[in-house]
C-alpha cells in the first residue's frame, strides 16, 4: 500500500482500476519539406481551422465554464500572431508539422515564463499543438482512452477539451501529475463534480490496472488499498449518493442557526442547475463574462438584459452581484491593459473602475434597472476594497444610481484590519478568501511554485476573517464568504464560528457543506474556530479543527 498526495478537488471518493492517458505524439522531425512553402501553408492553415472549429463545437456542447475555456482555446488555434509565426518557419523550408510545433513551443515558453494565470494556460497551447499535428498526420487526436469499463484516469495533465467531455459513467475519478488548484483541469473537474486529485507528482509511477482509492477531501490517492480500505471507500461513495438523492434543505447548524448556502456563478447559464442543487440564492455573480474578449464595454441595454435574466431566475432570493473585477490576470483593452510590473498589486478592481468611472456608472445603472423590473433581492458589491474612502466612494455612487443594498469585498488585509470602519460605510461585506489568502501570505494564488502557501487554513488568514466577523456582529451587518474556502466542509464550519453569516461556493459543493454544518451547533463551530486560530500553521490548524470535531462527536455519542 502506498499513499500519494496532491491537491484534492471536491469532497468525493472514488475506487477503481487505473487507466493511463496515452503518451503525447513525438516531436515532428526537423527536416526540409518536399512541398513548397505555399502548399505547406495551406495544410497548416486548414488544420488550424479544423481544430479551432472542433474545440468551439465541443465548448458549445459542454456549456458552462467549459464553453468559455474551449472557446478561448479555439481562438488560440486561429490567433493571427501564431499563424504568422508558423508562416515564418515555413518560409525556411520547414514542414507544416514542424512549423506548428516550433511556433506553439515558442509561445508556450513565453506564457510559462509569465507565471500565474497565463503560465497555467501554457498547457492549453500544448493540447492545441498536439491536435493540429495529429490532424496534419491524419492520426487520431489525443484524448481520453476507452478501455470498455469504469476506471480512474491518470494523466500528466488533462486538456480542457478532454476534461469538458469526460464520460462520467466511465471515468470514476481523475488523478493528474501536474497542475494546481487553479488549472483548467481543476476548474472543470470542480464544475462537473469529478472526484479528482491534481498535482500528485508520485502518480507518475502508477500503472494500468493498479487499483487505487481517490479521496479528494484529503488530497490522497491510495495505491494497493487493503480490502478494508476498499470497503470503506465504497461505503463513503454510497453515503454521498444517499445524501445527494435527498431534496436539499436550507443551510443550518444543528441548533437551527440559519447559514444560507449560496452559489458562485460566472454567467447566467448555471442558474437552473444551482437551484436544483439547493442554492438559496447567489453569493457571487461575476460579471466579467460580459466584458472579456470585447473591444468596448457592453451597453447599458446589453448588460440590463443579462442581469434581468439572472434576477428572474432567482426571483424572491438574494443575488449578490460583483461589479467588474478587471486587472491582474484579466486586463481589458478599454479599461486597464497598460503593462504593470506587478498587476496583482496594480490598477485592478475598484481602482480600475474609479479610474474609468463611466464604465462603473453604466454597470450600476443597468443593475438598478434590472432590479426595478424583477422580484429578486439584489445586493451589489465592489471588489478589491482597501480603504474606507474607496468604500464610501462606491456606496455613495451605487446609492445615487438606484442600488438599494451596496457592499464591499474584503480581499485585502487592510480592509480586514479596519473592518469596523469599512462596514460602517456600507451595508455588508463578502470575504474573498482566494485573494485575501494571496495578499496575506504574499503568495500569488495563480503561481504553482508558491501553491503551498495559498491555504486559507493558515491562522493569519483565519484571524483576519475573525476581525471581519466580529465587526459584522458588532454593527449588525451581514458578512458572507464567497471564496473557495467556503466549499471545504470542515473549514465552512470554522468560518461560521469566526462570524460568517452566509457561505457561497461552486454549486457542486453545496451538498457536502450542508451536511457538514448540520453536524455542529454554533458553540461547536466557535470551538472549532478557536482551535484552528490557536495553531501555528495551515496544516496544524486543520488538524486541530479536525481533532476538536472528533472530540465533539465522541462526547455527543457518549452522552447518548
Image (tube, rainbow, N blue to C red):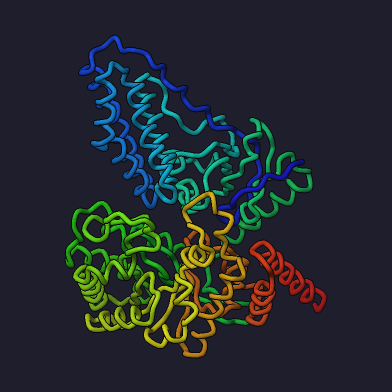
Give the mark count. Answer: 0
Left of 258 or right of it: where is 59? left
| Rendering quarter of residue 200 | top right
Please tell me which residue is depicted at 46% across the width and 42% down the height of the picture. Answer: 163
Q: Is any atom of residue 550 visible in this view?
A: yes
Q: Where is residue 453 in the image (x, y as percent from the top left)?
A: 57, 58
Please tell me which residue is depicted at 29% across the width and 23% down the height of the picture. Answer: 89
Please tell me which residue is depicted at 43% across the width and 62% down the height of the picture. Answer: 274
- On screen, 1 above or below 444? above
Left of 391 or right of it: where is 538? right
Q: Which of these two is toward me, 455 or 171?
A: 455
Q: Where is residue 108 in the image (x, y as percent from the top left)?
A: 40, 37
Extreme-right residue of the structure: 558
Left of 114 or right of it: where is 76? left
Q: Which of these two is toward me, 289 or 282?
A: 289
Q: Is any atom of residue 272 visible in this view?
A: no
- On screen, 109 above or below 309? above
Image quadrant where one finds the C terminus: bottom right
Extreme-top residue of the structure: 34
- On screen, 537 above or below 149? below
Image quadrant where one finds the N terminus: top right
- On screen, 498 above or below 50? below
Amino acid at each position: 500500500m502506498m499513499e500519494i498526495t496532491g491537491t484534492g478537488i471536491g469532497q468525493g471518493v472514488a475506487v477503481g482500476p487505473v487507466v493511463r492517458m496515452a503518451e503525447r505524439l513525438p516531436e515532428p522531425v526537423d527536416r526540409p519539406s518536399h512541398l513548397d512553402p505555399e502548399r505547406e501553408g495551406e495544410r497548416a492553415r486548414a488544420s488550424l481551422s479544423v481544430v479551432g472549429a472542433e474545440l468551439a463545437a465541443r465548448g458549445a456542447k459542454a456549456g458552462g465554464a467549459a464553453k468559455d475555456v474551449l472557446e478561448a482555446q479555439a481562438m488560440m488555434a486561429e490567433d493571427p500572431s501564431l499563424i504568422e509565426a508558423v508562416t515564418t518557419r515555413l518560409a525556411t523550408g520547414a514542414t507544416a508539422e514542424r512549423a506548428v510545433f516550433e511556433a506553439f513551443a515558442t509561445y508556450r515558453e513565453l506564457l510559462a515564463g509569465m507565471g500565474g494565470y497565463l503560465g497555467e494556460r501554457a498547457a492549453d497551447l500544448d493540447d492545441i499543438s498536439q491536435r493540429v499535428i495529429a490532424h496534419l498526420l491524419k492520426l487520431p487526436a489525443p484524448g481520453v482512452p476507452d478501455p470498455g469499463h469504469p476506471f480512474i484516469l491518470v494523466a500528466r495533465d488533462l486538456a480542457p477539451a478532454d476534461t469538458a467531455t469526460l464520460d462520467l459513467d466511465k471515468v470514476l475519478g481523475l488523478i493528474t501529475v501536474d497542475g494546481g488548484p487553479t488549472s483548467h483541469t481543476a476548474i472543470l473537474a470542480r464544475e462537473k463534480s469529478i472526484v479528482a486529485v491534481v498535482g500528485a507528482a508520485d502518480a507518475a509511477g502508477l500503472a494500468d490496472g493498479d487499483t487505487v482509492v481517490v479521496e479528494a477531501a484529503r488530497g490522497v490517492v491510495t495505491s494497493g488499498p487493503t480490502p478494508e480500505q476498499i470497503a470503506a471507500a465504497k461505503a463513503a461513495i454510497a453515503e454521498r449518493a444517499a445524501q445527494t438523492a435527498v431534496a436539499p434543505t436550507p443551510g443550518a447548524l444543528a441548533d437551527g442557526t440559519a447559514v444560507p448556502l449560496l452559489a458562485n456563478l460566472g454567467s447566467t447559464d448555471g442558474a437552473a442547475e444551482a437551484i436544483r442543487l439547493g442554492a438559496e440564492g447567489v453569493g457571487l455573480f461575476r460579471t466579467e463574462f460580459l466584458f472579456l474578449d470585447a473591444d468596448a464595454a457592453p451597453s447599458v441595454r446589453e448588460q440590463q438584459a443579462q442581469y434581468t435574466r439572472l434576477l428572474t431566475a432567482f426571483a424572491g432570493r438574494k443575488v449578490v452581484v460583483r461589479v467588474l473585477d478587471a486587472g491582474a490576470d484579466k486586463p481589458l483593452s478599454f479599461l486597464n491593459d497598460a503593462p504593470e510590473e506587478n498587476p496583482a498589486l496594480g490598477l485592478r478592481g475598484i481602482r480600475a473602475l474609479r479610474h474609468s468611472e463611466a464604465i462603473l456608472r453604466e454597470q450600476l445603472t443597468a443593475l438598478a434597472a434590472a432590479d426595478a423590473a424583477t422580484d429578486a433581492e439584489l445586493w451589489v458589491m465592489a471588489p478589491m476594497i482597501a480603504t474606507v474612502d474607496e468604500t464610501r466612494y462606491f456606496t455613495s455612487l451605487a446609492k445615487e444610481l438606484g442600488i438599494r443594498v451596496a457592499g464591499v469585498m474584503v480581499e485585502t488585509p487592510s480592509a480586514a484590519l479596519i473592518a469596523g470602519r469599512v462596514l460602517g460605510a456600507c451595508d455588508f461585506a463578502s470575504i474573498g478568501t482566494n485573494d485575501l489568502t494571496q495578499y496575506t501570505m504574499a503568495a500569488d494564488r495563480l503561481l504553482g511554485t508558491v501553491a503551498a502557501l495559498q491555504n486559507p487554513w493558515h491562522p493569519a488568514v483565519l484571524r483576519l476573517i475573525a476581525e471581519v466577523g466580529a465587526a459584522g456582529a458588532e454593527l449588525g451587518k451581514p458578512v458572507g464568504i464567497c471564496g473557495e474556502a467556503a466549499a471545504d466542509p470542515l473549514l465552512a464550519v470554522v468560518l461560521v464560528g469566526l462570524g460568517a453569516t452566509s457561505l457561497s461556493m461552486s454549486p457542486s459543493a453545496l451538498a457536502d457543506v450542508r451536511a457538514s454544518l448540520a453536524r455542529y451547533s454554533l458553540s461547536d463551530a466557535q470551538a472549532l474556530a478557536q482551535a484552528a486560530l490557536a495553531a501555528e500553521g495551515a496544516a496544524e490548524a486543520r488538524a486541530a479543527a479536525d481533532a476538536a470535531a472528533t472530540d465533539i462527536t465522541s462526547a455527543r455519542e457518549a452522552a447518548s
